[in-house]
């Protein structure tokens, strides 16, 4: 995959840094789903990186369209019926999972929308498929007072976001923007705005 990124979106900076750190390989012809795709041009960039990818994006605010080699759908990642089981080789969330279910972006309220989303990820991935995501990280878990996003604690992140059926393969902590992708130790003190953590997990087996 001919991926390159030299701009300043922190989630894309993290993804770019995670590719070599986690040894992530997107095979030609992969079926790839991005959850929470409305604020990033990641799908467009992935199509440029490899035109053979089958790319789909969903977001509560998306307008349905099929153009430029990918499909966009207005849908809720917390709903298991959006896709059939075993549909994708990769599922990616860039600065998105921490928002699901909080209603800040017009999605339906679901206090554990992030948990439900990851359960759906496990269902939608093909055996052997991968999920990559990044979320804000602090020493303790919290939901922001304005209901904008969640921050996750290192010691409980696996329990909350890696459901049965997925195996966490890699995890790395990062400084915040504008230094996203600069790897560091696990957070031990609060930081404003917050630390980042990037995670790679896999659904075991072969399709």
Image: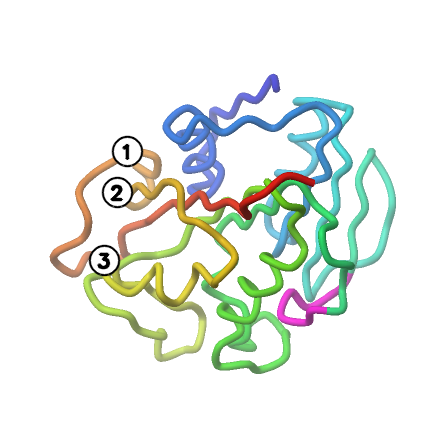
Please name the residue shown 35% across and 74% down the image: 144
Q: Nearer the viewer, residue 77 or 148?
A: 77
Left or right for 190, reference 108: left
Discs 3/1, front: 1
Residue closest to the far right: 66
163 relative to 106, above or below: above
Q: Nearer the viewer, residue 199 or 205?
A: 205
Tag on residue 192?
Answer: 3
Helix, strand or loop at label 3? It is: loop
Q: Say if mark 3 contacts mark 1, CB within 8 Å.
A: no
Residue closest to the far left: 189
Tag on residue 182?
Answer: 1
Residue range in magenta is 74-80
Coordinates of residue 91 in the picture (x, y in percent): 61, 47
Quarter of the figure with residue 189: bottom left
- Report the residue marked by disc 2: 175
Helix, strand or loop at label 2? It is: loop
Quarter of the figure with residue 60: bottom right
Please name the residue shown 51% across and 48% down the image: 94
Q: Say if mark 1 contacts mark 2, CB within 8 Å.
A: yes
């Amino acid at each position: 995959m001919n991926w390159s990124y030299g701009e300043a979106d922190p989630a894309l900076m993290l993804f770019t840094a995670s590719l070599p750190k986690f040894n992530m390989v997107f095979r030609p012809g992969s079926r790839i789903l991005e959850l929470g795709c409305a604020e990033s041009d990641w799908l467009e960039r992935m199509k440029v990186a490899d035109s053979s990818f089958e790319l789909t994006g969903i977001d509560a605010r998306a307008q349905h369209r099929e153009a430029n080699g990918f499909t966009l759908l207005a849908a809720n990642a917390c709903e298991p019926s959006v896709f059939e089981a075993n549909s994708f080789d990769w599922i990616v969330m860039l600065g998105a999972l921490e928002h699901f279910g909080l209603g800040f972006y017009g999605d339906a309220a679901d206090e554990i929308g992030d948990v439900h989303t990851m359960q759906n990820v496990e269902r939608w991935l093909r055996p052997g498929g991968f999920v990559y995501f990044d979320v804000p990280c602090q020493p303790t878990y919290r939901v922001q007072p304005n209901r904008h996003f969640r921050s996750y604690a290192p010691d409980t992140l696996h329990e909350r976001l890696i459901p049965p059926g997925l195996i966490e393969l890699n995890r790395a902590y990062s400084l915040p923007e504008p230094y996203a992708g600069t790897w560091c130790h696990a957070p031990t003190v609060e930081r404003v705005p917050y630390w980042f953590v990037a995670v790679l997990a896999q659904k075991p087996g072969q399709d």
